[in-house]
Amino acid sequence: MGREIRRVPLDFEWPLNKVWEGFLMPDRFDEVDCSDCKNGYSPQAQNLYDLWYGYLPFDPASTGSTPWRHDSPGVRAFAERNVTQAPDYYGSGEAAIVREGQRLASLWNGQWSHHLSQEDVDALVAADRLRDFTHTWSREDGWQPKEPSVAPTAAEVNEWSLRGMGHDSINAHVVIEARCEREGVETRCPTCKGHGSMEKYEGQRAEAEAWEPTDPPKGDGWQLWETVSEGSPVSPVFATADDLAGWMSDPERGDRWVPGDVARKFIDDGWAPTGVVTPGRGYSSGVEAVGWSESQY
Protein backbone atom coordinates (compact mmCIF):
# COMPACT_ATOMS: atom_id res chain seq x y z
CA MET A 1 0.00 0.00 0.00
CA GLY A 2 1.35 3.39 -0.88
CA ARG A 3 2.01 5.66 -3.85
CA GLU A 4 3.27 4.70 -7.30
CA ILE A 5 3.99 6.25 -10.67
CA ARG A 6 2.07 5.06 -13.71
CA ARG A 7 2.75 5.90 -17.34
CA VAL A 8 -0.58 6.54 -19.02
CA PRO A 9 -1.68 8.25 -22.26
CA LEU A 10 -1.53 12.03 -22.18
CA ASP A 11 -5.26 12.15 -22.87
CA PHE A 12 -6.08 9.52 -20.22
CA GLU A 13 -9.23 10.54 -18.39
CA TRP A 14 -10.34 8.78 -15.25
CA PRO A 15 -11.77 10.52 -12.16
CA LEU A 16 -9.25 11.21 -9.43
CA ASN A 17 -9.57 9.05 -6.31
CA LYS A 18 -11.88 6.62 -8.09
CA VAL A 19 -10.66 3.02 -8.28
CA TRP A 20 -9.74 2.05 -11.83
CA GLU A 21 -12.49 -0.15 -13.24
CA GLY A 22 -10.05 -2.77 -14.45
CA PHE A 23 -8.98 -3.48 -10.86
CA LEU A 24 -12.52 -4.33 -9.70
CA MET A 25 -14.12 -7.72 -10.25
CA PRO A 26 -17.29 -7.24 -12.34
CA ASP A 27 -20.65 -7.43 -10.58
CA ARG A 28 -21.66 -10.30 -12.85
CA PHE A 29 -19.52 -12.58 -10.71
CA ASP A 30 -21.45 -11.78 -7.51
CA GLU A 31 -23.09 -14.91 -6.15
CA VAL A 32 -26.25 -15.14 -4.05
CA ASP A 33 -26.10 -15.71 -0.30
CA CYS A 34 -26.57 -19.28 0.86
CA SER A 35 -30.00 -19.70 2.40
CA ASP A 36 -28.80 -22.30 4.92
CA CYS A 37 -25.78 -20.61 6.52
CA LYS A 38 -24.25 -17.27 7.40
CA ASN A 39 -20.65 -17.75 6.32
CA GLY A 40 -20.14 -21.27 5.02
CA TYR A 41 -20.17 -23.10 8.34
CA SER A 42 -22.36 -26.06 9.26
CA PRO A 43 -24.86 -25.44 12.10
CA GLN A 44 -22.48 -27.03 14.61
CA ALA A 45 -19.50 -25.01 13.38
CA GLN A 46 -21.57 -21.83 13.34
CA ASN A 47 -22.40 -22.43 16.99
CA LEU A 48 -18.67 -22.68 17.75
CA TYR A 49 -18.02 -19.52 15.72
CA ASP A 50 -20.58 -17.66 17.80
CA LEU A 51 -19.01 -18.95 21.01
CA TRP A 52 -15.57 -17.84 19.82
CA TYR A 53 -16.70 -14.23 19.42
CA GLY A 54 -19.15 -14.16 22.31
CA TYR A 55 -22.31 -14.01 20.21
CA LEU A 56 -23.67 -16.89 22.30
CA PRO A 57 -23.30 -17.34 26.07
CA PHE A 58 -19.94 -18.97 26.84
CA ASP A 59 -18.74 -20.56 30.08
CA PRO A 60 -14.94 -20.72 30.63
CA ALA A 61 -15.45 -23.95 32.57
CA SER A 62 -16.47 -25.65 29.30
CA THR A 63 -12.81 -25.61 28.22
CA GLY A 64 -11.35 -26.07 31.69
CA SER A 65 -10.27 -22.43 31.81
CA THR A 66 -10.23 -20.14 34.83
CA PRO A 67 -12.40 -17.02 34.51
CA TRP A 68 -10.60 -13.69 34.35
CA ARG A 69 -10.85 -11.30 37.28
CA HIS A 70 -10.44 -7.55 37.37
CA ASP A 71 -7.09 -8.08 39.09
CA SER A 72 -5.75 -10.76 36.73
CA PRO A 73 -2.39 -9.37 35.52
CA GLY A 74 -3.36 -9.17 31.85
CA VAL A 75 -6.75 -7.63 32.60
CA ARG A 76 -5.27 -5.18 35.09
CA ALA A 77 -2.60 -4.04 32.61
CA PHE A 78 -5.18 -3.48 29.87
CA ALA A 79 -7.46 -1.57 32.25
CA GLU A 80 -4.60 0.65 33.44
CA ARG A 81 -3.71 1.47 29.85
CA ASN A 82 -7.29 2.39 28.94
CA VAL A 83 -7.71 4.61 31.99
CA THR A 84 -4.34 6.30 31.48
CA GLN A 85 -5.02 7.03 27.82
CA ALA A 86 -8.59 8.30 28.24
CA PRO A 87 -9.21 9.60 31.77
CA ASP A 88 -11.97 11.91 30.55
CA TYR A 89 -13.93 8.83 29.48
CA TYR A 90 -12.97 6.22 32.09
CA GLY A 91 -12.27 8.45 35.06
CA SER A 92 -9.05 8.26 37.03
CA GLY A 93 -7.56 6.55 40.03
CA GLU A 94 -7.86 3.05 41.44
CA ALA A 95 -11.65 2.98 41.34
CA ALA A 96 -11.65 3.68 37.60
CA ILE A 97 -9.07 0.96 36.98
CA VAL A 98 -11.06 -1.60 38.98
CA ARG A 99 -14.27 -0.65 37.20
CA GLU A 100 -12.64 -0.97 33.78
CA GLY A 101 -11.01 -4.25 34.81
CA GLN A 102 -14.39 -5.64 35.79
CA ARG A 103 -15.84 -4.63 32.43
CA LEU A 104 -12.98 -6.24 30.50
CA ALA A 105 -13.09 -9.43 32.56
CA SER A 106 -16.83 -9.76 31.96
CA LEU A 107 -16.35 -9.18 28.23
CA TRP A 108 -13.51 -11.67 27.82
CA ASN A 109 -15.10 -14.33 30.03
CA GLY A 110 -17.90 -14.46 27.47
CA GLN A 111 -15.60 -15.36 24.56
CA TRP A 112 -14.11 -18.76 23.78
CA SER A 113 -11.19 -17.01 22.05
CA HIS A 114 -9.78 -16.04 25.47
CA HIS A 115 -10.35 -19.44 27.08
CA LEU A 116 -8.82 -22.07 24.81
CA SER A 117 -8.28 -25.63 25.92
CA GLN A 118 -4.94 -27.37 25.47
CA GLU A 119 -6.36 -29.25 22.49
CA ASP A 120 -7.27 -25.92 20.90
CA VAL A 121 -3.75 -24.60 21.46
CA ASP A 122 -2.19 -27.77 20.08
CA ALA A 123 -4.24 -27.32 16.90
CA LEU A 124 -2.91 -23.78 16.50
CA VAL A 125 0.67 -24.94 17.02
CA ALA A 126 0.20 -27.70 14.43
CA ALA A 127 -1.07 -25.08 11.98
CA ASP A 128 1.96 -22.85 12.71
CA ARG A 129 -0.29 -20.10 14.06
CA LEU A 130 1.48 -19.29 17.35
CA ARG A 131 4.86 -18.07 16.20
CA ASP A 132 5.09 -15.61 19.08
CA PHE A 133 5.69 -18.73 21.19
CA THR A 134 7.28 -21.19 18.79
CA HIS A 135 9.63 -18.96 16.78
CA THR A 136 12.09 -16.11 17.13
CA TRP A 137 12.27 -13.22 14.69
CA SER A 138 15.14 -11.07 13.50
CA ARG A 139 15.51 -8.59 10.67
CA GLU A 140 18.30 -10.68 9.19
CA ASP A 141 16.70 -14.15 9.32
CA GLY A 142 12.98 -13.50 9.70
CA TRP A 143 11.00 -16.13 11.64
CA GLN A 144 13.05 -19.11 12.82
CA PRO A 145 11.81 -22.11 14.88
CA LYS A 146 13.02 -22.23 18.45
CA GLU A 147 15.44 -25.01 19.33
CA PRO A 148 14.42 -27.03 21.22
CA SER A 149 10.81 -26.67 20.13
CA VAL A 150 8.35 -24.97 22.46
CA ALA A 151 4.85 -26.21 23.34
CA PRO A 152 2.88 -23.31 24.84
CA THR A 153 0.24 -24.07 27.44
CA ALA A 154 -3.38 -23.02 27.21
CA ALA A 155 -2.88 -20.66 30.15
CA GLU A 156 0.03 -18.94 28.39
CA VAL A 157 -1.88 -18.52 25.14
CA ASN A 158 -5.01 -17.26 26.88
CA GLU A 159 -2.95 -14.64 28.73
CA TRP A 160 -1.27 -13.68 25.43
CA SER A 161 -4.68 -13.26 23.77
CA LEU A 162 -5.33 -10.25 25.99
CA ARG A 163 -2.33 -8.37 24.59
CA GLY A 164 -1.68 -6.86 21.20
CA MET A 165 -3.45 -8.33 18.20
CA GLY A 166 -4.25 -11.71 19.77
CA HIS A 167 -6.15 -14.19 17.61
CA ASP A 168 -7.35 -13.41 14.10
CA SER A 169 -10.06 -15.01 11.97
CA ILE A 170 -7.61 -17.63 10.66
CA ASN A 171 -6.93 -18.81 14.20
CA ALA A 172 -10.66 -18.94 14.82
CA HIS A 173 -11.17 -21.16 11.77
CA VAL A 174 -8.28 -23.46 12.71
CA VAL A 175 -9.65 -24.02 16.21
CA ILE A 176 -13.25 -24.44 15.03
CA GLU A 177 -12.23 -26.93 12.35
CA ALA A 178 -10.12 -28.92 14.81
CA ARG A 179 -12.96 -29.01 17.34
CA CYS A 180 -15.41 -30.23 14.69
CA GLU A 181 -12.97 -32.95 13.66
CA ARG A 182 -12.55 -34.10 17.26
CA GLU A 183 -16.30 -34.24 17.73
CA GLY A 184 -16.91 -35.96 14.40
CA VAL A 185 -19.10 -33.27 12.87
CA GLU A 186 -18.93 -31.51 9.51
CA THR A 187 -17.35 -28.05 9.44
CA ARG A 188 -18.76 -26.86 6.13
CA CYS A 189 -22.34 -26.05 5.25
CA PRO A 190 -23.66 -29.02 3.22
CA THR A 191 -25.65 -26.73 0.92
CA CYS A 192 -22.94 -24.34 -0.29
CA LYS A 193 -19.93 -26.56 0.57
CA GLY A 194 -18.41 -23.87 2.73
CA HIS A 195 -18.55 -21.00 0.23
CA GLY A 196 -21.27 -19.08 2.04
CA SER A 197 -22.91 -18.34 -1.32
CA MET A 198 -24.38 -20.10 -4.34
CA GLU A 199 -23.67 -19.69 -8.03
CA LYS A 200 -26.28 -17.86 -10.07
CA TYR A 201 -25.39 -20.11 -12.99
CA GLU A 202 -23.19 -23.15 -13.46
CA GLY A 203 -19.57 -22.20 -13.98
CA GLN A 204 -19.87 -18.71 -12.48
CA ARG A 205 -17.34 -19.43 -9.74
CA ALA A 206 -14.84 -20.85 -12.21
CA GLU A 207 -15.20 -17.75 -14.37
CA ALA A 208 -14.62 -15.54 -11.34
CA GLU A 209 -11.51 -17.48 -10.36
CA ALA A 210 -10.18 -17.13 -13.90
CA TRP A 211 -10.77 -13.37 -13.97
CA GLU A 212 -7.67 -11.18 -13.81
CA PRO A 213 -7.42 -7.42 -13.26
CA THR A 214 -6.34 -5.22 -16.15
CA ASP A 215 -4.07 -2.21 -15.85
CA PRO A 216 -4.97 1.20 -17.26
CA PRO A 217 -3.64 1.87 -20.77
CA LYS A 218 0.03 2.73 -21.10
CA GLY A 219 1.32 5.91 -22.66
CA ASP A 220 3.79 8.78 -22.47
CA GLY A 221 2.13 10.62 -19.57
CA TRP A 222 3.20 10.65 -15.93
CA GLN A 223 0.63 10.23 -13.16
CA LEU A 224 0.64 9.62 -9.40
CA TRP A 225 -1.54 6.77 -8.12
CA GLU A 226 -2.47 5.52 -4.67
CA THR A 227 -2.47 1.81 -3.89
CA VAL A 228 -4.12 1.92 -0.46
CA SER A 229 -7.31 0.88 -2.25
CA GLU A 230 -7.20 -1.35 -5.32
CA GLY A 231 -5.60 1.64 -7.05
CA SER A 232 -6.71 5.07 -8.27
CA PRO A 233 -5.10 8.20 -9.77
CA VAL A 234 -4.47 11.11 -7.41
CA SER A 235 -2.85 13.61 -9.77
CA PRO A 236 -3.46 15.00 -13.24
CA VAL A 237 -1.53 13.47 -16.14
CA PHE A 238 1.68 15.36 -16.93
CA ALA A 239 3.79 15.36 -20.08
CA THR A 240 7.11 15.01 -18.24
CA ALA A 241 8.43 13.67 -14.96
CA ASP A 242 9.65 17.16 -14.09
CA ASP A 243 6.12 18.52 -14.51
CA LEU A 244 4.77 15.89 -12.12
CA ALA A 245 7.57 16.65 -9.65
CA GLY A 246 6.67 20.32 -9.87
CA TRP A 247 3.06 19.54 -9.03
CA MET A 248 4.09 17.36 -6.08
CA SER A 249 6.37 20.11 -4.75
CA ASP A 250 3.81 22.90 -5.09
CA PRO A 251 3.33 24.47 -1.60
CA GLU A 252 -0.36 24.89 -2.40
CA ARG A 253 -0.72 21.13 -1.84
CA GLY A 254 -0.46 21.84 1.90
CA ASP A 255 0.66 18.92 4.05
CA ARG A 256 1.00 16.75 0.92
CA TRP A 257 3.81 18.97 -0.37
CA VAL A 258 7.32 17.51 -0.63
CA PRO A 259 10.57 19.18 -1.75
CA GLY A 260 11.28 19.06 -5.46
CA ASP A 261 14.37 16.85 -5.14
CA VAL A 262 12.41 14.38 -3.01
CA ALA A 263 9.55 14.31 -5.51
CA ARG A 264 11.95 13.64 -8.36
CA LYS A 265 13.72 10.84 -6.49
CA PHE A 266 10.37 9.23 -5.71
CA ILE A 267 9.37 9.46 -9.38
CA ASP A 268 12.65 7.82 -10.37
CA ASP A 269 12.07 5.03 -7.84
CA GLY A 270 8.45 4.63 -8.94
CA TRP A 271 6.95 3.56 -5.62
CA ALA A 272 6.85 4.40 -1.91
CA PRO A 273 4.88 2.99 1.03
CA THR A 274 2.05 4.99 2.57
CA GLY A 275 4.13 5.84 5.61
CA VAL A 276 7.33 5.06 7.47
CA VAL A 277 7.93 5.01 11.23
CA THR A 278 11.48 5.41 12.56
CA PRO A 279 12.84 6.00 16.08
CA GLY A 280 14.38 9.31 15.08
CA ARG A 281 11.52 10.83 13.10
CA GLY A 282 8.36 9.07 14.17
CA TYR A 283 5.79 8.85 11.37
CA SER A 284 6.48 10.37 7.95
CA SER A 285 4.93 9.83 4.54
CA GLY A 286 6.61 7.19 2.43
CA VAL A 287 7.22 9.68 -0.39
CA GLU A 288 9.06 11.97 2.03
CA ALA A 289 11.12 9.06 3.34
CA VAL A 290 12.37 8.28 -0.17
CA GLY A 291 14.42 11.47 0.02
CA TRP A 292 16.16 10.67 3.29
CA SER A 293 19.78 9.66 3.40
CA GLU A 294 20.60 6.55 5.41
CA SER A 295 21.96 8.68 8.26
CA GLN A 296 18.60 10.44 8.62
CA TYR A 297 16.61 7.35 9.66
Image (cartoon, rainbow, N blue to C red):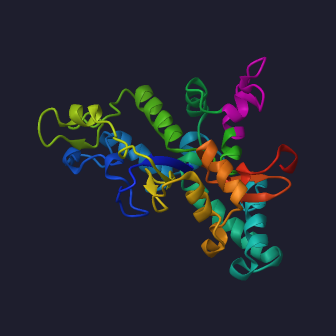
Q: Examine the structure image and report whether residue 24 is included in the region drawn in magenta.
A: no
Q: Residue furthest left?
A: 201
Task: Report how many numbered discs are placed on residues in the image.
Answer: 0
The x and y percentages for residue 216 are 36, 46
Q: Residue furthest top?
A: 148
Residue 184, image x and y in percent? 37, 26
Q: Is residue 293 above or below residue 19?
A: above
Q: Is residue 285 visible?
A: no
Q: Residue at x 22, y 31 (%)?
A: 206
**The one of 120 and 236 positioned closer to us in this rendering:** 236
- Judge by depth and name the residue closer to the eye, 63 or 33: 33
Q: Nearer the viewer, residue 250 or 49?
A: 250
> How far across and down, in percent of the image, does residue 142 sit?
72, 28
Asked which quadrant contains residue 294, the reply is: top right
- Magenta residues span 131-156
Residue in the image at 65% along x and 64% along y: 249
> What residue is shown at x 82% (from left), y 58% (from top)?
281
Dividing the picture into quadrants, the one containing residue 123 is: top right
Percent x, y for residue 278? Answer: 79, 51
